[in-house]
């Protein structure tokens, strides 16, 4: 892991996206962001701060707001922590060309994590509550909101 794949895909002389250093793991709480990305196809990028990078998934239909709804989430390359604040337009011809804006962000608590499943509590203004990511294939996961307890 790391940011090699992220950097290899981008020309930082053209895009205003952060070049990024992987930050050392510090104290404080972990953050998440959901970015609305109008690329060739609209999707929502869901990113969790883990181990000094942003673990990332592209969610075509967006993060579910109600329990019982499962959404496909495709794992993408780790992004630098700075990306959590990124909004702007990625120029035409560049990887992910199109506009990016923050749809929601906040803190989260990791409740459980192994190779196949992650459970966490999101505290955003639009998404709030317990969610899970369940791995179903090489890069494919399901993102779901858990029943309120
Ligand atoms: Mn994207």
Image: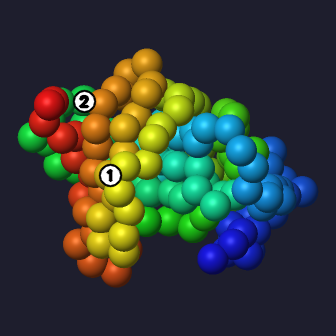
Name the residue nearer the viewer: 86 or 21: 21
- Residue 9 in the image: state x and y as whole percent: 69, 70
Q: Outermost residue, bottom direction?
A: 138
Q: Earlier in the sequence, mark 1 or mark 2?
A: 2
User: Dot 1 surroundings within 10 Å: few (below 14), some, or many (20 or more)?
Assistant: many
Name the residue furthest left: 68
- Pointer 1 and pointer 2: residues touching (CB < 8 Å)? no
- Write down the quadrant of residue 44 in the picture: top left
Q: Which mark is residue 98?
A: none
| Mark in front: 1 vs 2 | 1
Residue 141 in sight: no
Q: CA distance from mark 1 to mark 2?
A: 16 Å
Residue 142 image-quadrant placement: bottom left
Q: Position of residue 32 (x, y in %)?
A: 53, 40
Residue 95 pos. (x, y %):
64, 61
Pick the residue in front: 41 or 21.
21
| Quadrant (top left, top right, bottom left, bottom right) of the C terminus | top left
Disc 1: which residue: 119
Q: Residues within 10 Å of mark 2 (few under 14, many from 20)?
A: some
Q: Residue furthest top?
A: 125
């Amino acid at each position: 892991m790391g940011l090699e794949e992220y950097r290899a895909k981008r020309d930082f002389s053209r895009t205003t996206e952060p070049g990024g250093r992987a930050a050392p793991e510090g104290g404080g709480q972990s953050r998440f962001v959901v970015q609305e990305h109008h690329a060739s196809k609209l999707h929502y990028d869901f990113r969790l701060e883990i181990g000094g990078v942003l673990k990332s998934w592209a969610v075509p239909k967006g993060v579910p707001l109600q329990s019982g709804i499962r959404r496909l989430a495709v794992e993408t390359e780790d992004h630098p922590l700075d990306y959590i604040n990124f909004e702007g337009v990625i120029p035409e011809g560049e990887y992910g060309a199109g506009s990016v804006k923050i749809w929601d962000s906040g803190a989260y608590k990791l409740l459980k994590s192994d190779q196949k499943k992650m459970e966490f509590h999101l505290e955003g203004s639009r998404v709030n509550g317990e969610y899970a990511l369940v791995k179903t294939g090489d890069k494919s996961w399901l993102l779901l909101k858990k029943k309120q307890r």
